[in-house]
Image (cartoon, rainbow, N blue to C red):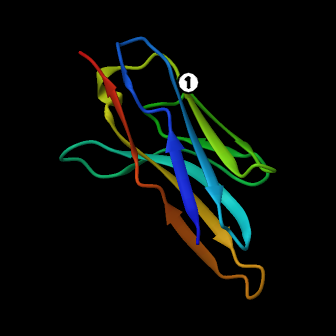
Amino acid sequence: QVRLVESGGDLVQPGGSLRLDCAASGTTGTIDTMGWYRQAPGKQRELVASITGGGSTTYGDSVNGRFTISRDNPENTVTLQMHDLIPEDTAVYYCNIRVIRRRGGNADNYWGQGTQVTVSS
């Protein structure tokens, strides 16, 4: 069974930093893209950052320049380093991975249960 364990969410003051980690286990295929999404109350879930297996990154416009995503392939982990946090960053952050099956080439998406990030105003 695929399991995503997220950690690092916390309450921080504006201008502070946080590091979110996500560890994947139980995968039987190859983990392709890994990423972080967030959802604030009353808003749609949005992409924060993603990273391909080859290390190519994509950032949401609102976090570009402040956040950095990285991954450790041997340990199947993805990390989001967040700096210069602002109140608008307050949301539940979800880890997402795309897994390619070893046979057949089908892809599956998995989501973590989310970790709360709160930036006080």
Q: In the image as oriented, which residue stretches furthest toward the left?
A: 42
Q: Residue at x 49, y 32 (%)?
A: 8
The 10 Å Cα crowd at callout 1, few under 14, some 14 to 19, many 20 or more, is few
Quarter in which the C terminus is drawn: top left
**Residue 41, how many percent across, how many down?**
21, 44
Q: Residue at x 58, y 72 (%)?
A: 1
Q: Is residue 83 above or below residue 37?
A: above
Q: Is residue 8 above or below residue 18?
A: below
Question: In the figure, is residue 114 to the left or right of 34?
Answer: left
Question: In the figure, is residue 19 to the left or right of 92?
Answer: right
Q: Quadrant of residue 79?
A: top right
**Does dot 1 land on a helix, a strand or a loop?**
loop
Q: Residue at x 76, y 46 (%)?
A: 55
Seen from the viewer's position, the closer of residues 74 and 65 is 74
Q: Amino acid at mark 1?
A: Gly
Question: In the figure, is residue 12 to the left or right of 36?
Answer: left
**Residue 30, how many percent across, how many down?**
75, 67
Seen from the viewer's position, the closer of residues 45 and 58 is 45
Q: Is residue 26 above or below residue 71?
A: below
Q: Which residue is denoted by mark 1 in the rendering?
A: 65
**Residue 19, how many percent across, how many down?**
55, 28
**Residue 72, how many percent across, how many down?**
75, 44
Q: In the image as oriented, which residue stretches furthest toward the bottom?
A: 104
Number of numbered callouts drawn = 1
Q: Residue at x 47, y 55 (%)?
A: 112
